[in-house]
Amino acid sequence: MATVQAFARRPQTGELIAAKLNQVSKNYGAVQALKNFSLDVRAGELTAVLGPNGAGKTTAIKLLLGLVRPTSGRVSVFGGDPTALETHLRVGAMLQVGRVPESLRVREHIDLFSSYYSQPLPMKQTLAIAGIENLRDRKFGDLSGGQKQRVLFALAICGNPDLLFLDEPTVGLDVEARHLLWDEIRQLLTLGKTVVLTTHYLEEADALADRVVVINKGSMIAEGTPQQIKARTAGKKIRCVTRLSAVVVQALLGVIDVQDDRGTMVIHTSRPEDVLRELLNQDLDISGIEVAGAGLEDAFLALTQEKAN
Amino acid sequence: MATTAISPAAITMKPNVFSICLKETKYEALKCLRLPMYSVSTIVFPIMFYVLFGLIMGRQNIGNISTTTYLIAAYGTFGVMGASLFGTAATLASERGFGWLEVKKATPMPPFAYFLAKVVMSMIFSATDVVLLLILGTAFGGVHLPALVAAKLLLTLVAGSLPFCAMGLAIGYFAGPTSAPALINVFYLPMSFCSGLWIPFMFLPKFIQKIAIVLPPFHLSQLALGLVGAGNGGSSRVHWEALVGFAMICLGIASAGHQRDQKAHG
């Protein structure tokens, strides 16, 4: 696309580390938001930090932005201090915000934020990348939820940053708006930008990420490509009434987790066919069999259990 | 793996701090001008009071000057106080509470630009108030102030707005995002009344006159009234010292609030 050529300032390869959390812990009073959490953000890649609400995703982003300081451990961005002006000049962020000054127009917000950077994008280009040319003269308060998110996205990219943080950028958006924003994020990746995105949608991480970091209760519980994560989480749940013991079932190939739900055994497995065959072989009286896809909650549970074991 | 592979020295050019401050102030002013809550309570109210109680009803003298002259100083102080308190406290509390300040802190914006913009914007609104009162009084109220006195009055009131900006920052750091306007009024309206901004000081009950001595708007209004020949004879140096002392206390409170925010974030 001709209008976005200038946007690609420095092509980067996936071998370099753009930002790093090294054994970082962060306490808010008695609450430990992150526990010995390490993260390498590779340049030119999209790293998705995936986890349920309250997992510590936003804390990780705020540490990398220098908005909060670690209780222990080290944070570095471009090899330097995340709070330094030199760092902030190369970083853009889309944070979760309760309220944005509503009486300013879209172009006014962008004009102001662009002025903070030494080499901002021209207004036209920022509007084009965020897909909001038609919203230029609208007041922020008059926009829909999806449009507001895209304006915040525009504010994150207007300084032409090398590294972009997107904290749950599509939360609360409908499917169409979500896919529009995904397209815009993909466009940035083709321009060699480095992106860190937090989300609680596995689907979103899968659609965008080069690498996924799964986090729960402040600790990393899995890390890998979306394919690797999906392989570990895309299991099935088998419910049945059986005389087999939990220990025996747990030992079967492909069983991730076994739980008892008021006399019904709930088996989380990555290989439902194999497990079913074994169950039917070993227990002729087995009854009440139900097989269902495991939701993301189950996937997190499975990953957490795996980690604990 | 090397962590410093991407050089932090890639950007050598720094953004222009002066132009950031200018833009920040411009948009701060536009933002507030478009908010009726702000523009009405800071410009329309003092002007409306002046038209009602000065131009329409104020036919007598207060002391040895006309009511219309007296009220330029009194409502000028009232307007300056409102512009400063609402201009700083209301926006700061809301932007702190709803996360907008954090969004700005994540950018390379110099933090002082944010606060400077609010103070300068408040001063612009304060000056507008005073100029409008002077124009109205001169055109319709038979006010004859020499240009030098009018200029001194304007400068005094605008300079005297700074302690109230400091007070606004202090409130803004401790008020909730939605409760700030109410909290401002809890201070603003009783302070204005007790300082003799609505009812001339000499007509206030004795015990309120005693309270007034410790209220900053009393000191600013006395400086303004002194310039138009209706002060109660106190030394202007004492009034300025009271205002500076009050500003220092407020800045101390604001800075404690700032520290508390920083601490909460680590």
Image (spheres, coloured by chain):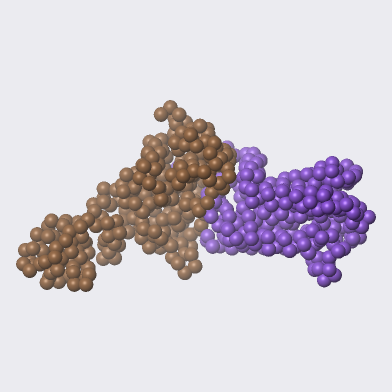
Chain colours: A brown, B purple
The structure residue drawn at horizontal position 27% and vertical position 60%, both measured from the top left corner, is A298
x and y percentages locating residue A130 in the rendered image = 45, 38
Between residue B16 and residue A142, name the one nearer to us: A142
Residue at 59% across, 63% down: B260
Residue A189 occupies quadrant: top left
Q: Quadrant of residue B94?
A: bottom right
Q: Is residue A204 visible?
A: yes
Q: Residue at x 30, y 59 (%)?
A: A297
Residue closest to the far right: B64
Q: Position of residue A163 (x, y in %)?
A: 45, 43
Residue A190 is situated, as x and y percent measured from the top left of the image, at 38, 36
- Give the number of marks: 0
Residue farthest toward the top in the current orientation of the protein: A2
For the C terminus of chain A, the image quarter is bottom left
Does residue A31 lie above or below B229 as drawn? below
Residue depicted at 51% across the width and 57% down the height: A68
Q: Depth check: B110 or B145 in front?
A: B145
B153 relative to A280 in the view: left or right:
right
Q: Quadrant of the N terminus of chain A?
A: top left
Left or right: A283 with respect to A307?
Answer: left
Residue B9 relative to residue A170: left or right: right
Residue A175 lies, in percent from the top left, at 35, 45
- Is residue A226 depicted above or below B191 in this figure? above
The reply to whether residue B80 is in sight is no
